[in-house]
Image (spheres, rainbow, N blue to C red):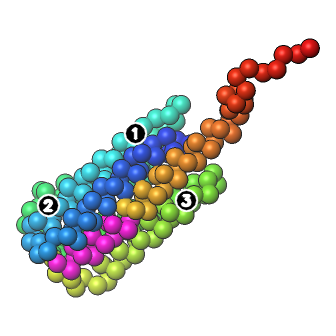
Amino acid sequence: MSAHGLAQNWWLIALRGLFAVLFGLAALAWPNPTLAALVLLFGVYLLADGLLAVIAGLTRHNGSQPWWLLLIEGSAGILAGVLTFLLPGLTAIALLYLIAAWAITTGMVKMVSAIRLRAEIDNEGLLAMSSVLSATLGVVLMIWPGPGALGLIWVVGAYALVSGFLLIGFGFRLWNWQSSAHLALHPARVEVGRHPHPPQKK
């Protein structure tokens, strides 16, 4: 995973964050969700997030190979999302462990991604924070499987809201980094734009 290749798809990262924010708002605004509604809502979010991650992972730039970290993260989301639809009779405890496993997996992948990007850019902090948040959610749900459907959706909704804003911020930081890198590689174009008619030699 290269910073340059990732920056090419900054909008996909920001879009993933937007989906997370929308899911978080919907979850927190829902007063008394049933377990079936919670499964459906979370399944849609997992599928959308997973598909966007896979699309970003399969995108090639200048012959670069697919980003296997994004493919792993996206595949985990799609798998978890499909399971929520194939197993509509999930109990609250089964859904809780499914969410926990997904959160830990994505958290580990994001942390590895942040470490790999650290050598190229200085803006990987938001991605690292998102990874810590995901892993923490998974561990907390594993060791504290106490909340019912209402408590679970509040926890997951709050996580999605914060994680979404972090991803949106990381996406726009990548866009800003890409713009700065482009100007650094092509300074002559900027100078020509400033002086369309260079002075003639005497």
Q: Tag 2: Cα neighbours inside 10 Å, few (<14), some, or many (≥20)?
A: some
Within-10-Å neighbours for mark 3: few <14, some 14–19, many 20+:
many
Which x, y percent locates residue 185?
68, 36
Q: Which residue is mark 3?
A: 124
> Can the viewer see residue 113 in this picture?
yes
Question: On the picture, is 180 further left or further right than 10?
Answer: right
Residue 140, by quadrant, is bottom left
The residue tagged with tag 2: helix, strand or loop? Answer: helix
Q: How many marks?
A: 3
Is residue 102 within the magenta segment? no
Specify start and end residues of the magenta stretch as a single range: 150-163
Within the image, what quadrant is residue 158 found in? bottom left
Which of pointers 3 and 2 lies earlier in the amino acid sequence? 2
Q: Look at the numbered disc 3 and give the secondary structure of its residue.
A: loop
Identify the mark nearer the N-term, 3 or 1.
1
The residue that mark 2 highlights is 40
**Residue at the spot of label 1:** 58
Q: How many angstroms separate mark 3 from mark 1 (CA)?
A: 21 Å
In the rendered image of this protein, does residue 161 appear above or below residue 4? below
User: Which quadrant holds the C terminus?
Assistant: top right
